[in-house]
Image (tube, rainbow, N blue to C red):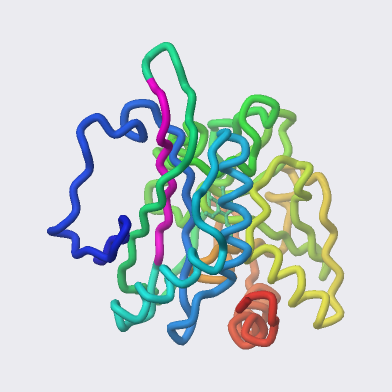
Amino acid sequence: MLVWRKAWLTEAETKLDIDEPGFLYGGVAYETLRTYDMKLFAPKYHYERLLNTLSYLGLELPLDYPTFRRILEEGVQKLGKEASIRVIVVPRGRFSAFEYSPEHGELIVYMRELKVEPLGYVKIKVSNVRKIDPLSTPADLKVAGRTDILLAKRSKGDAYDVIMIGNRGQVCEGTFTNVFLVKKDRLITPSVESGILPGITRLNTLRLCRTLGMTVEERWVELAELYGADEVFLTHTSRGIVPVNEIDEWKRYETRIGQFLASRFEEFIKTVKENWE
Ligand code: PLP
């Protein structure tokens, strides 16, 4: 693994201080990126989403987009392999048990080889931990250690992901994925207003569907619809589109449309210029 902290370092050369405010007080923003053919996928979207998280935290990132992108590209060249990239921004400022006054953020980048193992039979579960009310913690506040996500992940077992339900019983998203349903050839996905992170893979899936002439309803989704769907698939950066075979150990799904979209995804995203800017 390579780490960037003011310069590219090997894992052995890195150390974090024991009084690191990110450990002591939290508030660490993060993004997970990947490459395709060793080119960064959607770096600008990730940068903008990172700035969005930082704006909630009152943090500035002293790095403009071209510099951010150049650092990541340098890392990919050094790694020399298809990369999985974790970007975090740790707060710097005045902190104590009584005060949280972050001023700016420090960027740290972790880069390792992307290994995408073949998918087996994909199971999901519905989490019995509700998502935090977005009035307390906005759904697009992407910080490490969100307790709704941590607690939901605890029940994951051998499931691929756990679906989180919102404060009014609506289907939201997985702990690292967005969710799509197919019912009688209609495609449905929870709207941003349902309280989800607007995933970059979700956005690209919506675009792919549009290009193929398939309409997707972005709306409020009741839990019963998830159980009643013909198909369900998940979307996330590392894998694109993931058709689901089973939910909660009993209900089985078909995977026809999900498989079809998954097979078109990579070729499609390479044609969208905004993904490579
Ligand atoms: N939902 C949540 C809560 C996430 O943390 C993520 C990604 O980390 C996603 C959805 C999927 O987003 P993306 O497609 O940008 O990877």
**Relative to residue 112, is residue 252 drawn left or right?**
right
Whether residue 228 is visible, yes or no, is yes
Relative height, residue 99 to residue 112 (above, below): above
The one nearer the camera, 14 or 249, is: 14
Please give the range of residues in magenta. Answer: 85-95
Position of the C terminus by quadrant: bottom right
Which residue is at the front of the view, 63 or 109?
A: 63
Residue at image point 25% right, 29% down: 19
Instruction: Using the rendered image of the protein, determine whether residue 249 is visible from the camera's viewpoint.
Output: no
In the image, residue 130 sits, relative to residue 270, either above or below, namely above
Please provide percent x and percent y for residue 72: 42, 69
Measured as percent of width and height from the top left, residue 108 is found at 36, 53
Q: Is residue 217 magenta?
A: no
| Quarter where residue 112 is shown | bottom left
Ligand 1 lies in which image quarter? bottom right
Residue 31 picture location, percent across and down: 49, 55
Residue 43 placement, left or right of 227: left
